[in-house]
Amino acid sequence: MMQFMQRVVKTLGRIWQQLIRLWQQWFRRSPPQSFPKKPSNRVRVETVKGPLHQPTKPLSAAEYEFLFSELLDGVHRGWSQAQVTQFLKEIGPESAPNVKGSGADGSDNEVYVFWLRQFGSRLLNSPVPNHELARRMVRLGQLNCGQLCVVAGEIGQNLLDREANTPSSSAATPDSPVSSEFTLEHYLQLGQIHLDRRQYPSALTTFEQGANHSPNHPEVLYGLGLVCHRMGLYQEAIGHLTEALAQKPEFVAALTQRGLVYKALNDLEAAMADFESAVGMKPRTPEECCARGKALMQLKQPFEAIAAYEEALTTHPESHQGWYDWGNVFYDLQRYDEAIAAYDRALDLQPDYAPAWLNRGAALGNLHRYGEAIAAFEKLLEIQSHDYHGWLCLGQTLERLNRVPEAIAAYERALQLRPDDPTAWRYRNAALLDIKKS
């Protein structure tokens, strides 16, 4: 009888989990501080033929930096020449941003090339190395996919040549212009801003400048680990985070972050070991309490995580990041009203914090408060117009209100940012079919 009851309980548990998955299948929050890892060699799914509608507005220079990061990430993951060519084709001349001083007419990605030359000038004028970025740009140039690739390859090679001819460039000196121009805190704050905006090449450059200013500083190494994780450079991320831990052995945030990188590499044993080590440490600061809470969530201990965040926010209530992370715990528990309240506290402290607007909109959508969800996504996109997930979620919400033409425009905006992503193609095509049937 006991065995029979145990089987019944297990069966009911599986049914409950299936109901939860069905309930949440519309809105899915992207993991906090991280983009979902994109599968290699993604295939575009297109069931409706025909050109894209005209985009709602040209891409900005910031969006082109995001696109360039996406392109370099694809090359790093093994994109073929055909995939790179398709990516550039889908961006199209109609996406040309209003880049100040550009004389290009927008054809054949001329404005994109103009932006890249400006970006390359900034890199070459920076006194700090950009080794990984340079190597990726050289690899892009080797694919011979047009003028953009040629320019990228030239910039990357110039960066590598400069470093080869200046072997001491990575060492900080008392007379270094980098060490005297800004403080270390400036680089850490600016790097985090670039991370929040998903401007990964700029974030990498900024943290490398911080490393040139203060070599072996654990917070700088942690920042480098974060940006390398976001760019899919998992081994480099582990290296930086391990160095940070060598400098600061009880660095809870670095332990938790390294565990997340191991998890991305599917090394679950190493990941769990780092999470357990982070949980076992006694946090001394509110930031460490929050990092411990994140590790507890990875160990599937949400109520203990809530307690950790409560401890952090009781002593440090002005932490917008803490309120945001706490909201994510409630979101995962499907306690959406409490999640929204936590996101609101984060936004009271930092009104332009884009991730909180995204997750707030998703929570509102799960509560069927679609008008408020649209307002949240529109606020997000006002702050960070190159947020792919924001455009995708906005399109889904508009469809719920039967505003299908506006939804299609949002999906096509998402496709400008990730031209090879099958999800936006699938949603866009389904919406087009709905219009044809009506």
Image: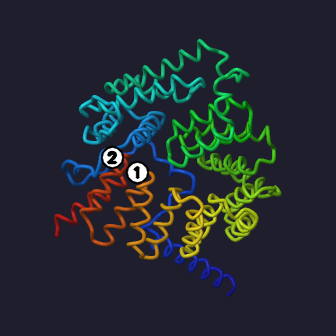
Q: Residue 43 carries which label?
A: none
Q: Residue 12 vs residue 294: left or right?
A: left
| Number of other residues with Cα within 10 Å of mark 1, as a class: few under 14, some 14 to 19, many 20 or more | many
**Residue at the bottom extreme of this rendering:** 1
Give x and y (percent) for residue 319: 66, 59
Separation of residues labelled 2 and 1 (CA atoms)? 11 Å
Mark positioned earlier in the residue sequence (2 or 1): 1
Expressed as whole percent of the image width and height from the top left, the position of residue 209 reads 62, 31
Image quarter for residue 100?
top left
Which amino acid, mark 1? Answer: Ser
Residue that appears at 18% across and 49% down: 50
Instruction: Please report contact status of discs 2 and 1: CB closer than 8 Å, yes or no.
Output: no
Q: How many labels does the image show?
A: 2
- The residue at which mark 1 appears reads as 385
- Provide residue 236's location: percent of width, then percent of height: 62, 35
Residue flagged by tag 2: what amino acid is it?
A: Gln
* Viewer-side residue, 143 vs 178: 178
Q: Which mark is residue 416?
A: 2
